Image (cartoon, rainbow, N blue to C red):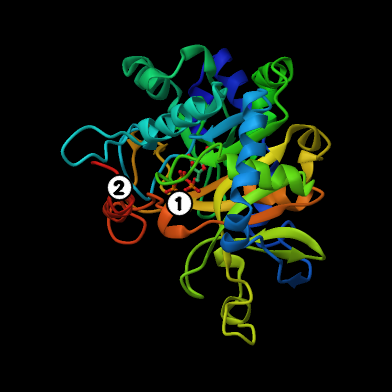
Amino acid sequence: MDYYRQLDKGGKEKLEWQVSSFDWSLLDLIRGQSDAHERGCFSPISVLTASELEKNASAYETQGVEAIRQGEVGAVLLAGGQGSRLGYDGPKGTLNIGKTKDVFVFELMINELSRIARKSGTFVHLYIMTSDLNYKKTTAFFENKDFFGYPEEYIHFFVQENLPAVDLSGKLLMAERDSLAYSPNGNGGWFLSLGKSGLLEHVHIHGIQWLNVFAVDNVLQKVVDPVFIGAVGSSGADCGTKVIRKTGPEEKVGVLCLEDGVPSIVEYYDLGKDMAESRNEDGELTYGFGVTLNYLFRVEALEHVDMSKLPVHLAKKRIPFAAPDGTKIVPKEENGYKFEYLVLDLIKLMKDCLPCEVVREREFAPIKNLTGVDSIETAQALLEKNGYNL
Ligand code: UTP
């Protein structure tokens, strides 16, 4: 309130607008009064296993390459995250994970796309989602690196939406005297943000029917993978997801299952102990397939999804803010909540989804943490194991 009184007319109007457009019902999530996470009845899902995929790989690949050649496939790289666990000062994609030479995370993804372009004879349009916070650094990085040799006219950037962040008791945090602290609204808003940016028009104009959506973290993933595209395309499903076998009940990955009979993903923190530890007669985990954040969506089907049904999640994070005396504070500990939409919730809103198992040692090396599990070191080791020269 003290802030408000000291503001000039423009500052007051700005802050009033920000506060009045905040959806106060989001605070119910903090008070535990929201039913946004009320879940249905879970059961196991059947998956196209890696060996089944392998058996038909050549036919799937031919079909996938043909779809790419016809220009039917686009790619969406989700790169708007803040990477707070990694604590690297810059967009995660600009991280250099080379040991004897430069190897940037974005570069690995562009190299994959270039490999697919050589195979199919066609460049795939890549749409990169950034946040307000990392847009400038991301675009400047690509320009500085000459887009790693990929044609610039095939790379398009768009910016995701923001939502105000709150402290641990649910009070709105300030970024400036006349402005709330905003944070990126999670990776689940990508399709709406693509639309708002005008790039969905571009998707239509270019006849793109499928979008391969993937995270920046997994440096070993195959993007625009023809086998995956062929498998999903020939199944008739509206979407597909690459899954891996969990290493054990405690692994922190979202788990794919059926919820009230439709494919759905349960985040690891929502997976109860019973479900996490349940095993089939053959000893395999009943809910043993984790998602890798690599999806294929049919564009037409996405357009029929009621995105207002996406639930909002609370993410406890370190959120920079301005103290009452105006001092900027960058906290060392988690000090508040961001509100996030998650791409994994989209699966439940699609009509169907084909889960395709990939071999984790060949396709899953996420960088989430500075050290330990899913860190730069573990990712480097997996890349080297797969023949990458770092
Ligand atoms: P994470 O869930 O790991 O979040 O993102 P994060 O913000 O990058 O990292 P932490 O949790 O703070 O450590 C998974 C993928 O979704 C993207 C990320 O860039 C990453 O590719 N993402 C996440 C967005 O594009 N926007 C967001 O708001 C959040």
In this rendering, the answer to whether 292 lies above or below 248 is above
1 and 2 marks in contact (CB < 8 Å): no
Residue 242 location, x and y as percent? 58, 52
In the picture, the quarter occupied by the C terminus is top left
**191, 48: nearer the viewer:** 48
Q: Which mark is residue 220?
A: none
Residue in front for this viewpoint, 4 or 311:
311
Which residue matches tag 2?
387
Q: Is residue 175 left or right of residue 187?
A: left
Give me the residue at 56% from left, 36% from top. 224
Tag 1: Cα neighbours inside 10 Å, few (<14), some, or many (≥20)?
A: many
The residue closer to the viewer here, 297 or 178, is 297
Please tell me how many numbered marks the rendered image carries: 2
Q: Residue at x 31, y 49 (%)?
A: 332
Disc 1 designates what residue? Answer: 363
Q: Earlier in the sequence, mark 1 or mark 2?
A: 1
Q: Residue furthest left?
A: 100
Question: Can residue 253 be seen by looking at this rendering?
Answer: yes
Residue 279 lies, with reference to residue 148, above or below; the image says below
